[in-house]
Amino acid sequence: MSIPSGLMVGTGEYTTGYVHGSPSESDKSAGVIALTMFDLRRRGKVAGLSMVGTTGTKFPGIRAHLQRAIGETYRDLDVSCRTFPEDTVERDPEAYLLALDSLSAGDFVTIFTPDNTHFRIAMEAVTRRLHVLIAKPLVKTLAEHHELVQAAKRNNVLVALEVHKRWDPIYADARDRIRSLGDFSSFNSYMSQPKTQLETFKGWAAASDISYYLNAHHIDFHAWAVTGRALPRSVYATAATGVAAAKGIKTEDTISLHVTWENLVSGNIGTATYTSSWIAPPSDVHSQQRFFYMGHNGEVSVDQAHRGYSLATDAKGFASANPLFMKYAPDVNGRFAGQLGYGYRSIEAFVDAVIAIRSGDSQPAELGHVVATAHDTLLVTAILEAGRRSLDSGTIQRIEYDDTGLPCNLLANPS
């Protein structure tokens, strides 16, 4: 088995659990990416590990945090990794280039950085023949998405979107059941995070929006569930404002995307509304997440935030727990035991795919059934960009398709 090395691009909440000089107040204070990578290295699936951010002076604090949150919490879990830029560097937004150059063709990169930086970092990685896993949204425009797909094809590398809900056993089961419910009729989803996230992401919130950040989850799930059976035709977006603006952040509070879908065989019309917000009050969960799906022959409802498992402690009060995403509590032997969590499994599946490519057992183009490839997630970007265009212009956006059935262009509907 050919073992790859990996570079983690981005040092924020999802990678390390460290935000603005202290542990995150969310349910991910130990991070997700770094914790998973350290365990995959322990299991022999990853060789060298490195991490890059834009500010080297943050790394002493990050290392101390990782040691406390992971190294001292789990038995036999090494948290060492090479970091870029040097600890003395105040700011270097291009440090990722040097970090990418430290890898070899066939290694991999994870990109968990502000949305507007994904494209340029991913393209630099792909041109170095590195495999890439990118946080939602993959990129911000359909044109960038197509360019990245073509670059990945030219360099024969895997580029995938990190959509962990595909590994959630309840979502996966719902998807399989949905496929037997006949034509698609209606889909409604809601996902929120508390106002504190506006502070966590204030450095880039105005360069993106909450729809790109959160609606991407359920858009991907819905598109995945009706793959080959229905296509989105038009998008109209609405938004609420006020809370972010009062904090001096130029972005919407809540965004709803209203999407018209067409069932391909019958021509019947379906409708979907994807709503996301980051002005929720503190509650029993960090993120409210739910959806309702109706087909012609049945319906499905999922409340992802509440699985019938709650706890209360003196330190943190009442909470609804979700160890199905990531089991942070050590096992009875003091070891990390979160390998079955869908947050972990989505990352491991990507690393396994990279290993299969390196060993010659698979080609990137053959792995669409294993991970959410860039090629297979074009609809997600098309809907998200159409939503942003609709908000900016106040018009309905129509999605056009090429001869192969892939979304290729967005046009404002004539009034």
Image: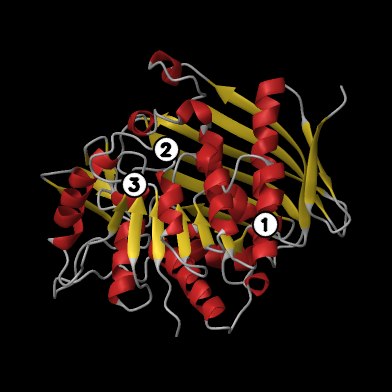
Which callout, 3 or 2, points at the residue further toward the start of the chain? 3
**What amino acid type is highlighted by mark number 2?**
Pro
Q: Cα distance, mark 3 to mark 1?
A: 26 Å
Q: Observer-nearest residue: 137 or 128?
A: 128
**What amino acid type is highlighted by mark number 3?**
Thr
Q: Cα distance, mark 3 to mark 2?
A: 13 Å
| Residue 23 visible (yes or no) | no
Q: Cα distance, mark 1 to mark 2?
A: 23 Å
**What amino acid type is highlighted by mark number 1?**
Ala
The residue carrying mark 2 is 93
Picture quadrant where residue 12 is located: top left
Q: Observer-nearest residue: 380 or 277?
A: 380
Q: Observer-nearest residue: 147 or 203?
A: 147
Mark 3: few, some, or many residues within 10 Å (few <14, many ≥20)? many
As drawn, is 393 to the left or to the right of 243? right
At which x and y percent is residue 337?
Answer: 26, 71
As drawn, is 171 to the left or to the right of 10? right
* Circle on res. 11: 3
The mark lying in front, picked from 3 and 1, is 1
Q: Are marks 3 and 2 in contact (CB under 8 Å)?
A: no
Image quadrant containing the C terminus = top right
Mark 2: few, some, or many residues within 10 Å (few <14, many ≥20)? few
> Considering only vertical position in the picture, is 26 above or below 412?
below
Residue drawn at (42%, 78%) of the image: 3
State the SS at label 3.
loop
The residue carrying mark 1 is 151
